[in-house]
Image (cartoon, helix red, strand yellow):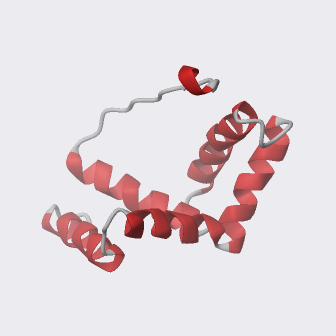
């Protein structure tokens, strides 16, 4: 990030596989505007930090609202799916894999 003139941050959390998969599904639900409120809030806060650092948002509050808007209008999900497809993923297969894996751990 510094080579590009950007401030970078890194957050790392330790998780076991079933909890990790649940977090992925919750994250997908979040960017569809249907996720848990606490996840939406932390995502908006962290996303706003990035938008401010990149000069896209002029304040934390503006950045958070920009992120929330993408959840509500569907553009966050649309962009995420486009990124996955550009990397060669078959999106429906990935979601099916997550559900099947969670079922094998008796989480679904």
Left or right, residue 39 beside residue 97: right
In front of the other: 15 or 60: 60
In the picture, which quadrant includes the C terminus? Answer: bottom left
In the picture, which quadrant includes the N terminus? Answer: top right
In which image quadrant can residue 50 be found?
top right
x then y, percent, for residue 40: 62, 53
Left or right, residue 90 beside residue 59: left
x then y, percent, for residue 25: 40, 62
What residue sits 35% from the left and 62% below the top? 87
Q: Is residue 50 above or below residue 104?
A: above
In front of the other: 57 or 15: 57
x then y, percent, for residue 94: 28, 70
What residue sits 47% from the left and 69% below the top? 81
In front of the other: 33 or 3: 3
In which image quadrant can residue 42 be found?
top right
* Residue sticking out furthest to the left: 104
x then y, percent, for residue 27: 47, 57
What residue sits 64% from the left and 69% below the top? 75
What residue sits 77% from the left and 36% below the top? 55
In front of the other: 7 or 13: 7
């Amino acid at each position: 990030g510094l080579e590009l003139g950007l401030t970078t941050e890194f957050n790392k959390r330790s998780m076991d596989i079933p909890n990790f998969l649940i977090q992925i599904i919750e994250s997908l639900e979040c960017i569809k505007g249907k996720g848990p409120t606490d996840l939406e809030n932390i995502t908006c806060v962290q996303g706003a930090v990035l938008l401010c650092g990149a000069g896209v948002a002029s304040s934390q509050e503006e950045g958070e609202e920009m992120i929330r808007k993408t959840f509500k209008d569907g553009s966050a999900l649309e962009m995420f799916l486009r990124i996955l497809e550009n990397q060669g993923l078959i999106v429906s297969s990935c979601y099916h894999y997550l559900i099947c894996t969670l079922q094998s751990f008796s989480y679904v």
